[in-house]
């Protein structure tokens, strides 16, 4: 029997208040009110804001959650799993490729019955890269063993996040729970939301963490083995128990939803049914589009058409019996899937609905499958009318004309194919002959001669104008200076980041050389494959006659935190000795996703996940020295560079090319300014990075064949400045100059001095 709860919050037992917030803000607020123990996270759009909001409110002293920034989503999932074994409450949020990167961890968490809550802010799965909302990542979650709750608006995001923890910890369930909402549609659009006025009421509803039946790896009086190797027949028994728990989750969710409805006036049954009592045609949609379709239902009802809509609040376990019941008198239903199960003749939802109807003996309802809204394509009321038209036609005909198809796509026409706007660069223009590199036979070191830089201005730029970078962005001035030292043809691979996103908006590209993109973490591995294929095809003579005058130089460009998530593959490529260059533009954060902290962010610096407040003053740990890490792999050449010292950078680029073509992998790190997130003037980039060098924060040096050489010493030239001279130029660091932050500033000074002293010692003593 349907439960008729009062919608007015004044009639509820728990005091409510109204806020006007987005889905991401409500996910963070629910987590804040619950006050989880640990959140392991890694930034990825559009879920990143959740960690940002929690960091900001933690800086203000509003919760105690330990926020652990990881080096990638695989690690964030591991952090959360480890924390969940240790007896506390755990929270996470991710999207798209990030979810897939952690995917192999998720069945482990479910299979070992470790509760937690994770928000999946749904986004399309690459490739090609698209950061907008569809359900292609959500459908990968269906077989992980996690109960899945759905949220069509920010109100549901808040409510489901509170109910999810109670569900996860229930004795009949004890599973991690996924809360899914639509990226950008729900995550970023603000709505009026009712919340608990008091956090203690939230915690009272969720209850204390159950002490019985949960593994706690911190209980020394009860040593346990977590995740043992398991043979048959035990493994199938484990899976059976997990299956039972999953189906229990459906029943328990209904109980929790009723309790929550009595407390708040907001009730979430397994299915959200709209005007389905006498419906003859229906549309089934998941999440945000399900609200739009209700307007269409009302419009059709006004025309005398008995229309209704169905949207699930939970899809694991799948509400099979409820769907069959809802459709038993419906003549035709159109199922819209915002992701395709490619090759399966429909998306996951339509095939599960067909199974539900078959299982419960309904052979009369016609089912139409349409894939819609991929890559964030908007869904409007007129689209809803089209989905209903399909159902109306099928109901009238008694059959479905086209059971499966895409809706809203454009197959394209050959005459509108993208055309090349710029002719390929001439090899003769790229190979100027003005730069010479010679190896000393006795020492093995290289000597480089470059002309006055104005002589190299005629060399074509590798990047065309028209990219979408912010005004004053230092990435492209830094990279173009570096590329002035590279002679001849290149093949470039870019990690995901500002340099990639701002230069490749389809159907346009700013890249005049061959460009490749692969995922954030595995660029070095990908380019390794390109390199080895080049040399093998050359050995077999397959490249003869293709116009190649000299060997390519292979360059991987990384930045925006790429040497956090991508460090492992980069080290692997270095140890394998592939003939390629990795050049990192260091902007000290994940700028392309909203300026979150990276391991390259220095101590005390403000980012969107190292906020300034009464409980914290910027990032709490020292920055990672990627150049020294890569030097420890014993590759032939490592360098640092800066556009403020162009002759130095061009020389190092020339050396890098020689070593990459003759010996093995090269690593370079270029400091670049990010005016937007460093909070500097657009025109101040060169002076800002110059001050970083003059203060010895970012020393210019090279490690050639294991020998360290400082190529610019501000002390010898009488130009060294205090670290504060650099910090005061950036809005993200001026707080460090306040008296109350003297301790953090001194720690930063000490670390800069320690690294500079070690570098000078290596310069003076080649054996170090």
Image (cartoon, rainbow, N blue to C red):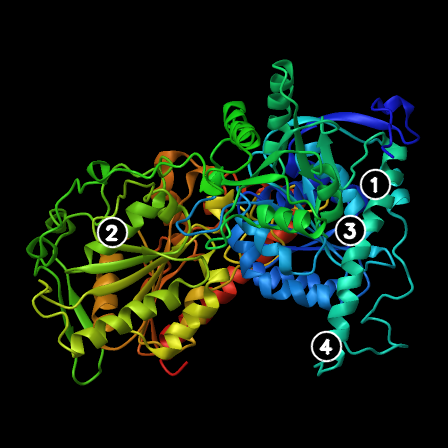
Earlier in the chain: of badge 4 and badge 1, it is 4
> Foreground mark, 2 or 3?
3
* Cα distance in 3D space between marks 3 and 4: 32 Å
Q: Badge 2 local density, few (<14 within 10 Å), some, or many (20+)? A: many
Q: Residue at x 88, y 59 (%)?
A: 171
Q: Which residue is mark 4?
A: 235
First in residue order: circle 3 vs circle 4: 3
Q: Residues within 10 Å of mark 3 (few under 14, many from 20)?
A: many
Callouts 1 and 3 close, C-beta under 8 Å: no
Q: Residues within 10 Å of mark 4 (few under 14, many from 20)?
A: few
Nearest to N terminus: mark 1 or mark 3: 3
Q: Residue furthest bottom?
A: 442
Closer to the camera in the image, 64 or 505:
505
Query: Disc 3 vs disc 4: which is toward the camera?
Result: 4
Residue in the image at 70% along x and 43% along y: 59
> Left or right: 555 with respect to 54?
left
Image position, residue 323 (x, y; %): 71, 42
Q: Which residue is mark 3?
A: 36
Q: Which residue shows up at 51% across the image and 48% down it?
A: 346
Closest to the observer: 513 or 694?
513
At mark 2, the secondary structure is: helix
Question: Quarter of the image containing the C terminus?
Answer: bottom left
**Relative to 126, is 221 above or below?**
below
Depth check, mark 1 against mark 3: the one in front is 1
Q: Alpha carbon of mark 4 to alpha carbon of mark 2: how far?
A: 58 Å
Q: Which residue is mark 2?
A: 481
User: Could you say which disc has been placed on residue 257 in the image?
Assistant: 1
Along the viewing direction, whichever of 124 and 158 lies nearer the viewer: 124
């Amino acid at each position: 029997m349907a439960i008729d709860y009062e919608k007015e919050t004044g009639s509820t037992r728990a005091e409510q208040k109204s806020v006007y917030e987005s889905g991401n803000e409500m996910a963070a607020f629910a987590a804040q009110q619950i006050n989880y123990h640990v959140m392991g996270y890694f930034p990825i759009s559009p879920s990143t804001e959740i960690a940002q909001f929690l960091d900001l409110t933690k800086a203000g002293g509003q919760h105690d959650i330990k926020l652990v920034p990881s080096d990638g989503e695989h690690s964030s999932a591991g952090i959360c799993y480890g924390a969940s074994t240790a007896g506390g409450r755990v929270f996470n949020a991710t999207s798209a490729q990030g979810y897939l990167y952690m995917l192999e961890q998720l069945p482990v968490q479910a299979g070992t019955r470790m509760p937690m809550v994770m928000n999946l802010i749904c986004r399309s799965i690459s490739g090609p890269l698209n950061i907008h909302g569809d359900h292609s990542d959500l459908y990968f979650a269906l077989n992980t063993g996690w109960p899945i709750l759905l949220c069509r608006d920010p109100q549901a995001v808040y409510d489901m996040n509170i109910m999810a923890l109670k569900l996860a910890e229930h004795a009949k369930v004890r599973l991690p729970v996924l809360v899914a909402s639509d990226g950008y549609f729900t995550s970023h659009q603000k709505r009026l939301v009712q919340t608990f006025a008091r956090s203690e009421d939230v915690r009272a509803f969720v209850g204390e963490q159950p002490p019985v039946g949960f593994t706690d790896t911190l209980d020394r009086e009860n040593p346990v083995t977590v995740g043992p190797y398991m043979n048959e027949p035990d493994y199938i028994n484990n899976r059976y128990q997990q299956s039972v728990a999953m189906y229990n989750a459906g029943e328990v969710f209904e109980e929790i939803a009723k309790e929550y409805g009595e407390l708040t006036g907001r009730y979430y049954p397994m299915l959200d049914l709209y005007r389905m009592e006498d419906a003859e045609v229906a549309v089934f949609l998941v999440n945000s589009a399900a609200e739009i379709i209700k307007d269409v239902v009302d419009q059709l009802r006004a025309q005398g058409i008995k229309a209704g809509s169905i949207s699930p609040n939970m899809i694991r376990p799948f509400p099979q019996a409820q769907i069959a019941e809802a459709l038993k008198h419906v003549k035709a239903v159109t199922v819209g899937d915002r992701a395709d199960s490619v090759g399966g003749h429909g998306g996951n939802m339509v095939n599960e609905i067909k199974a539900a109807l078959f299982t419960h003996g309904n052979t009369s309802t016609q089912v139409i499958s349409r894939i819609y809204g991929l890559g964030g394509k908007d869904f409007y009321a007129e689209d809803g009318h089209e989905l209903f038209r399909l159902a109306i036609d099928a109901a009238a005909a008694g059959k479905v004309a086209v059971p499966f198809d895409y809706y809203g796509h454009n197959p394209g026409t050959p005459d509108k194919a993208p055309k090349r706007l710029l002719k390929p660069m001439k090899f003769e223009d790229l190979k100027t002959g003005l730069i010479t590199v010679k190896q000393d036979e006795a020492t093995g070191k290289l000597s480089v001669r470059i002309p006055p830089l104005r002589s190299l201005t005629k060399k074509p730029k590798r990047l065309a104008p028209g990219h979408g970078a912010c005004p004053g962005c230092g990435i492209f001035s830094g990279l173009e200076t570096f590329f002035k030292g590279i002679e001849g043809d290149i093949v470039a691979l870019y990690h995901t980041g500002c340099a990639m996103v701002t230069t490749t908006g389809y159907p346009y590209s700013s890249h005049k050389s061959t460009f490749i993109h692969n995922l954030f973490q595995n660029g070095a591995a990908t380019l390794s494959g390109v390199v080895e294929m080049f040399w093998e095809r050359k050995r077999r003579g397959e490249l003869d006659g293709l116009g190649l005058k000299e060997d390519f130089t292979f360059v991987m460009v990384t930045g925006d935190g790429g040497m956090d998530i991508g460090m492992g593959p980069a080290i692997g490529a270095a140890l394998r000795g592939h003939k390629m260059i990795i050049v990192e533009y260091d902007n000290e954060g994940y700028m392309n996703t909203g300026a979150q902290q990276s391991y390259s962010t220095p101590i005390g610096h403000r980012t969107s996940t190292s906020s300034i407040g009464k409980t914290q003053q910027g990032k709490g740990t020292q920055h990672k020295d990627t150049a020294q890490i890569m030097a420890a792999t014993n590759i032939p050449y490592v360098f640092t560079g800066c556009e403020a010292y162009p002759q130095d950078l061009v020389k190092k680029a020339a050396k890098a090319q020689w070593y990459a073509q003759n010996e093995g992998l090269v690593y370079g790190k270029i400091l670049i300014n990010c005016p937007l997130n460093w909070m500097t003037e657009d025109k101040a980039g060169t002076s800002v990075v110059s001050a970083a060098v003059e203060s010895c924060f970012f020393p210019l040096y090279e490690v050639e064949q294991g020998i360290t050489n400082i190529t610019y010493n501000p002390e010898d030239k009488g130009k060294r400045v205090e670290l504060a001279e650099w910090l005061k130029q950036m809005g993200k660091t001026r707080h460090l100059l306040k008296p109350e932050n003297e301790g953090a500033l001194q720690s930063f000074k000490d670390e800069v001095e320690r690294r500079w002293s070690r570098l000078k010692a290596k310069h003076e003593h080649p054996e170090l």
